[in-house]
Image (cartoon, helix red, strand yellow):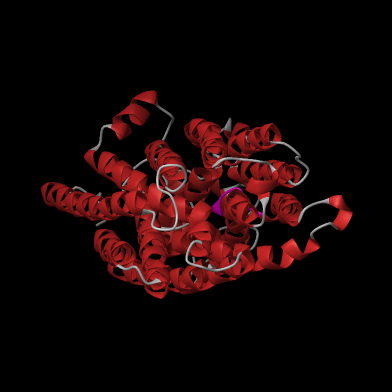
Amino acid sequence: MDDKDSHSLSDGDVKLTQLTPSVLALATTTRLPPRRNVWLRIDLFLLPIVTIIFFLSFLDKGNIGNARVAGLQKQLHMSNNQYSLALTVTYIPYILVEFPSNLLLKASAVSFAAPYAHLAHQRVGANVLLPTMAVLWGTVTTLQGLITSYSGLIACRFFLGLFEGGFLPGLTLYLASFYPRQRLQLRISIFFVSTSLAGAFSGLLASAIVHMEGVGGRHGWAWIFILEGLVTVLCGVAAFFLLPRDPGAARFLTHDERVYVERVLHEDGVLARDDVFSWAEVFSTFKKPHVLLMGVAGFFNGATLLGLVYFAPSIVAALGFTANQAQLMTVPPFAVAFVVSNATSYFSDRYGARGLSMIFSTIISTAGFALFLGSTADHARYGALFLIMSGTYAAAPPLCAWMANNARTHTGRAAAVAALTVCTNSGGVLATWLLGALSPAPRYTVAGVVLLVFQVGIALCAGANWVWLRRRNRRRRGAGWVYAL
C-alpha cells in the first residue's frame, strides 16, 4: 500500500461509513498517510481510554478478594460456602447478558444504504453502551461499601454482574473494528493485561485504604468499595465524550487517515458492506470447530484467571503473611504477568503466531502449578505464583484475538467473541467453588491439580485448532480469506 501523490477526497458532509465500494475504491488514489503513524495515533487516543475502563472493571470485580482479607467475611459472618455463593451470584447475570449485549452492538453497527444511512446513527453504539455499563457497575461497586448484611452483598454482586457482563465482549468487538487482524492481539493484550495491573494495584490500594478503618463509621473494607467505585463512575462519564463510534467518526484522525483505515479494514475482511444480521450466521458460528475448541480453552483459562482474581490475596495470606502483607505481596506476581503478557503478544502479532503463543504461555503456567503442588516450602510456592500468573495472563490475549481474527463477518465476530466470554466466565463459576469451599487453604491441592490439568487442556485445544486452521487454509488457497494461525 504505497503512498501516492494526488488530490484528496473532499470531506464534505458525507460520513465515511456511508461510502459505497466504488467510492472507497477511489481512496486508492488518495494521498495516504504513513501506516505506522495512523495506527499509532489510534493507539495513543483509544487504548488509554479502554485500558483504564477495563482495568477498573477487573478492579471492581476482584476487590472483594481484598475486602475478604481485610475483614469482610468475618464482619458479615460469612462461611466459606457463603463467600463462594456470593461470587457465583455475580456470574449468573454476567453470563446471561454477554450474548444479547454483543448482538445489540452488532445491530447498532449495521450499515444502511442511502437514503437510509442516517438511521444507523440513531442506534446505540459501543461509544454509548460501554460507558453506560461502567457508570452503572461503578455505582453498584460504591453501594457495596454501604452494606451491613450478607443479603445486601448478594444483591450488589447480582447487579454488578448484570451491568458489567457485556463489557469484555463488547470491548473486544469494538477494538476489532479499528484494527486489521494482524495488529489486533497486541492491542487486546494492552487492555487485557491491565487485569494483572488491577491485581497489583488492588493490593497496593487495599493496603492503604484499610487504614481508613472507622472513618465515617465504616470499616476499612467498605472504603475499598466506595473509593474504587466512585473512580469508575467518573471515568465512565468521561468516556461518553471521548470514545468515537467507529473509525469513520474518529475526530482525532484526518479525513485521509479515516479513508485509509477503512480501506485497510475492508481489504483485511474486518469490514464488509454486505454484512447484515442473520440468526443463521449466529448459529452457524457456534458449530465451527475453531469456535468450539477456543470455547473449551476459554473455559479452562477463565477458571484459572478468575480464580486468581478472587483468591490471590487469600492464597498469599495462607503462605504465612499477615493480612496487610498479603495485600502487598500480591503485587510482584501480577506485575511480572503484565510484562510477560505484553512481550508474548508483541511476538505473536509480529509473527502471526496465536497458537504457538498460547502453547508457550500454558507451558509456563503448567510449570508453576507443578511447583506449587510439589513443594512444601512457602517461599517456593510463592515463587510458583509468578509462573502461574504469567502463563495464565499471557494465554488470554491470543485466545481472545484468535477468536476475533477468524470470524469473517461482523455478526460472526460478535457471536464468536460473546461465546468465548460466556465460556470464560462459566469457568469463573467453577473457580469460585474450586478455590473456595472445595479446596481448603493452605495447600489448595484439589484446585491445584484441576487447574494444572486445565493448562494441559488449553495447550491441546490450541494445538488442535492450529492444525485444523492450517488444513483449512491449504484447501482455501487462492480463495482470498485466510485463517489466522
Image quarter of residue 485: bottom left
For the stretch drawn in magenta, the main secondary structure is loop
The foreground one among 319 and 304 is 319
Residue 370 locus on image (x, y percent): 27, 63
The foreground one among 248 and 371 is 371
**Residue located 46% across and 62% down the image:** 187
Image quarter of residue 343: bottom left
**Residue located 24% across and 50% down the image:** 457
Residue 87 in view of the camera? yes
| Vertical order, 311 against 380 (above or below) | above
* Magenta-colored span: 243-247
**Residue located 77% across and 53% down the image:** 219
Residue 335 locus on image (x, y percent): 50, 72
Q: How many marks?
A: 0
The foreground one among 55 and 248 is 55
Is 409 one of the magenta-colored residues? Answer: no
Residue 173 locus on image (x, y percent): 48, 46
Q: Residue furthest right?
A: 216
Residue 268 in view of the camera? no
| Vertical order, 315 against 137 (above or below) | below
Image position of 384 (left or right of 187): left
Is 246 one of the magenta-colored residues? Answer: yes
Residue 280 locus on image (x, y percent): 34, 25
Q: Residue furthest top?
A: 279
Image quarter of residue 114: top right
Which quadrant: the N terminus? Answer: bottom left
Image position of 353 (left or right of 44): left
The foreground one among 211 and 23 is 211
